[in-house]
Amino acid sequence: MSRIGERLTPDPELLASRATQKPTRALFATYIRDVVARLSADPDVSLALFELRLEAARRPSVAEALGTWRRHAFEGDVAFTTQAGLPGTRSEIALFHYALDGLMLDRLTVPIDPETSTDEIVEQLVSRLLA
C-alpha cells in the first residue's frame, strides 16, 4: 500500500501551482482529470489497488490497513479542496471517490462505453455532481 501511495501521490509543485489559481468548477475538473491521469498512467498500480481491496474483503488485517490508508487519502483530498477554495463539500468529494473508483475499474477492465472518452466522462461527473 505504501508503494502504491507513493506512485499515486500528486506532484506537490503541480498542486501548489493549482492552489494559486482562481477556484472554479473548471479547475476542479482539472484536478479530477489529474487524479484519473495518475490512476491511468500505470494500470498495474491501479489494478493492484483493486486487488488489495478484494483481498481486504477476505482478510481483516488487510481491510484495517487499507481502510486506514484510504481514509487518510480521502481526508487529504477534502483538506486540499477546502484549502484551495475549490467547489465541493465533503459529501461531494466522497461521491467523486465512488464515481472514480467505478470509472477506473471500468476503464482498466472491460469498458461499458469505450467510445466515450474518459475526459468527457470526468466533465459530465463534475457538471452533474457540482450542479
Image (tube, rainbow, N blue to C red):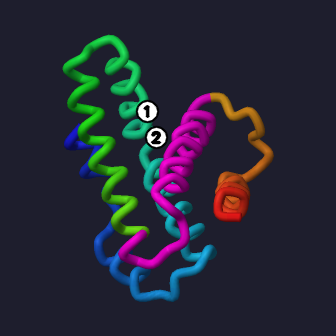
Q: Residue at x 58, y 80 (%)?
A: 24
Q: Which residue is mark 2?
A: 43
Left or right of 18 in this view: 87: right
- Residue 11 percent coordinates (x, y): 32, 68
Location of residue 47 (image quadrant) = top left
Q: Amino acid at mark 2?
A: Pro
Disc 1 crowd, CA 10 A, few/some/many (<14, 14-19, 20+): some
- Residue 7 percent coordinates (x, y): 30, 51
Q: Which residue is mark 1?
A: 47
Q: Residue at x 49, y 55 (%)?
A: 93
Q: Amino acid at mark 1?
A: Leu
Q: Quadrant of the C terminus?
A: bottom right
Q: Residue at x 62, y 75 (%)?
A: 26
SS class, disc 1? helix
Left or right of 119 in this view: 75: left
Question: Magenta part of the protein: which range?
Answer: 82-109
**Is mark 1 in CB contact (under 8 Å) with mark 2?**
yes
